[in-house]
Amino acid sequence: MRVAAIDCGTNSIRLLIADVTAHADGTTTLADVHREMRVVRLGQGVDATGLLAPEALARTFAAAEDYAELIRNCAADGTAVERIRFVATSATRDAGNRAEFTDGITARLGVAPEVVSGAEEAALSFAGAASALPALAGELVLVVDLGGGSTEFVAGSGAGVQAALSTDMGCVRFTERYLRSDPPTAAEIAAAEAAVEAKLDDVMAQVPLGDVTKVVGVAGTITTVTAQALGLAEYEPEVIHAAVVPLGKIAQAATELLAMTRAERAALGFMHPGRVDVIGAGSLIWATVLRRLAELTHGRLESATTSEHDILDGIALGAAGGLH
């Protein structure tokens, strides 16, 4: 079955067209036909205004129109998309005018977007990451999905999700709230770190962070920090996916990105232009999360695994009927 999955977050909108195969052992695999990402910053100003900005809606609608054309044209090999699933997350959940968004997407794609809850977002992220990292099935794994408006913390194993929490903490939201200078000041950094620590206190009350044996980071902030930690000259997804990076190297990479000016970040070969202004906040969040995890596990957790597969893959699996 060929499906199309669309993930519309606070910073980016992403499309995956994939062929889904169900196997006799009960597993389901995805084979990419087309995968792409565009930064549309749908969540521009939502944290302050509670509304999706007209220019942000226009950017997102333009991308949706292009995606609709890609979905129609992907049948050149004779296989058409049978199902489309569109999932919207943090920015849309928070917006008072989200009906304008959902109506606009339905008109352009012919499918109503699902504005999922934080818990649903967490489950989709875990499923997408787990589908691409089967070697972790026997572990108690923490998947961290660090987005533009929210970060999901999901603990689970091969048996599925055991505990999860979605927090209002993301690279766009924290840039707008705290890191306004270029580069951020020491006072701004201290305020942002304190806010992350407070969010982690909430997570600890619901997710057994101290019991996890592995941590997997997903989404563009974490893959970008990984590229910095690996010293890549350009973005190489095949190198980044499944990379196991020592926590010290991640902390160093995060510190470097946070200290850079936006012009310096823009000059990095692996840096997507749409992440230049928000990667500092994302780096700070990821480094602070890992520092807390190292403390809670008493040093047992020494590295983090990066996955290029995430909520988008979970959405595709769901479109095929394998996950709801």
Image: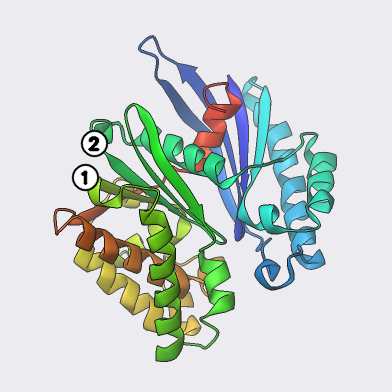
Element type where label 1 sits in the image: loop
Q: Position of residue 282 (x, y in %)?
A: 45, 67
Mark 1 or mark 2: which comes first in sequence? 2
Q: Can you name the residue that lies furthest to the top here?
A: 24
Q: Position of residue 285 (x, y in %)?
A: 40, 67
Element type where label 2 sits in the image: loop
Q: Classify residue 194 as left or right of residue 82.
A: left
- Residue at x 70%, y 43% (from the top left corner): 67
Q: Position of residue 270 (x, y in %)?
A: 42, 65
Q: In this view, does 25 lie above or below 58?
A: above
Q: How is the image coloured?
A: rainbow
Q: Which three-letter amino acid code belongs to the residue tagged 2?
A: Glu
The image quadrant that residue 46 belongs to is bottom right
Label drawn at residue 213: 1
Q: In this view, does 76 lie above or below 213?
A: above
Visible in this render: residue 130?
Answer: yes
Q: Classify residue 17 as left or right of residue 237.
A: right
Q: Alpha-carbon neighbours of circle 2 within 10 Å: few (<14), some, or many (≥20)? A: some
| Label pair 1/2, CB-CB below 8 angstroms | yes
Q: Position of residue 78 (x, y in %)?
A: 65, 19
Badge 2 is on which residue? 139
Q: Which three-letter amino acid code belongs to the residue tagged 1?
A: Thr
Q: In this view, does 22 lie above or below 39?
A: above
